[in-house]
Image (cartoon, rainbow, N blue to C red):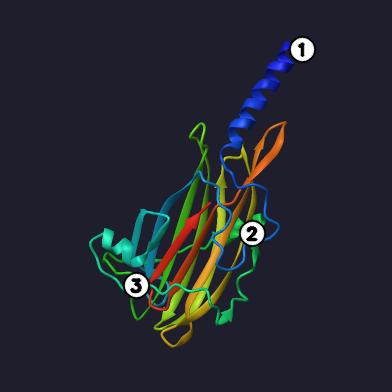
Amino acid sequence: MKAFWFSLLIGLAASAALLTVNAAGAKPPNLPPRGTPGVAAPSGTPGTITFTQYSPDGLTVLDVTRVPATASDTAASVAARLGKTVPGVTKTETPTEADPALPSIAATRTDSSARARSFASAKRVKRAADCCSSSGCGSLEVTRDITSDVFGNWLGTFHHRVYWCWDYPRITGVNVACWSDVDGTFIDNNGCGGWGNYYGWRGSARGGHVSYRQGDWSNCVYFFGCFKNIYPWIQIWVNGNGAWAQDQGG
């Protein structure tokens, strides 16, 4: 009997501690509307930004840049940190064209396949390349980390990746993926969802593209069930010259 009450007290203490991981409140019934930053869990921190630039054929790797992320970054701000100068990015959410190739919901079962895009056959070229060019392809992967406020342990990392090609000023193709790596001891991954659309830039109706992706995690304790949800989110803008920007929260 004493062992039962001891186990119960330990479980309640653990669940109370984990509940402080976020203050997001009840799970929203739907994804946030366009322009809404998202439902924030205050314990999230920016992860990393990895930008890979390819040649116009999408096969030759010209440059890979990996830097720590902040809550809001652009190609220009990251370049400045690295002692370079590149053009700024135009950020807007006014759609000129829907993006039928991007599903509004990316279920958990598609996460692994969505991130499986591989460029293993790409030939790496030893040269430094700026983000921006008249034509080319790029891949931008941004992450956000969630840790426990109480114990400081890692709970999960949310990923949002955009691969796009351009022929200035038009974006010729976009592929968007989102997925989560989580500590299955305390977090259930319910997948990710979002929206995306093209917007006008430099005279082209497909000159820019914006995508919003939000994770959905359940904060759970074995035997006691799930108590709260955590919603990390990342929004990415890309232009038809290779310039990009990202905001994040949750």
Q: Is 182 on the left or on the right of 144, as rendered? A: right
Whether pointer 1 and pointer 2 mark residues with C-beta atoms closer than 8 Å, the reply is no
Which residue is the site of mark 3?
A: 88
Q: Which residue is mark 1?
A: 1
User: Left or right of 241: which side holds 110?
Assistant: right
* Alpha carbon separation for disc pair 1 and 2: 46 Å
Q: Between disc 1 and disc 3, whose residue precedes?
A: 1
Residue flagged by tag 2: what amino acid is it?
Answer: Thr
For label 1, count other residues whose C-alpha is less than 10 Å away and answer few (under 14), some (14-19) or many (20+).
few
User: Which residue is the site of mark 2?
Assistant: 110
* Residue in the image at 48% along x and 34% along y: 152
Residue 230 lies, in percent from the top left, at 60, 47
Q: What element does badge 1 sit on?
A: loop
Nearer to us in this view, 183 or 91: 91
The residue sitting at 74% across, 17% down in the picture is 4
State the image coordinates of residue 116 (x, y, percent, origin top left): 54, 59
Point out which mark residue 171 bears. Answer: none
- Looking at the rendered structure, the kind of residue marked 1 is Met
Circle 2 sits in a helix, a strand or a loop, which is it? Answer: helix
Q: Residue furthest top?
A: 2
Q: Secondary structure at mark 3?
A: loop
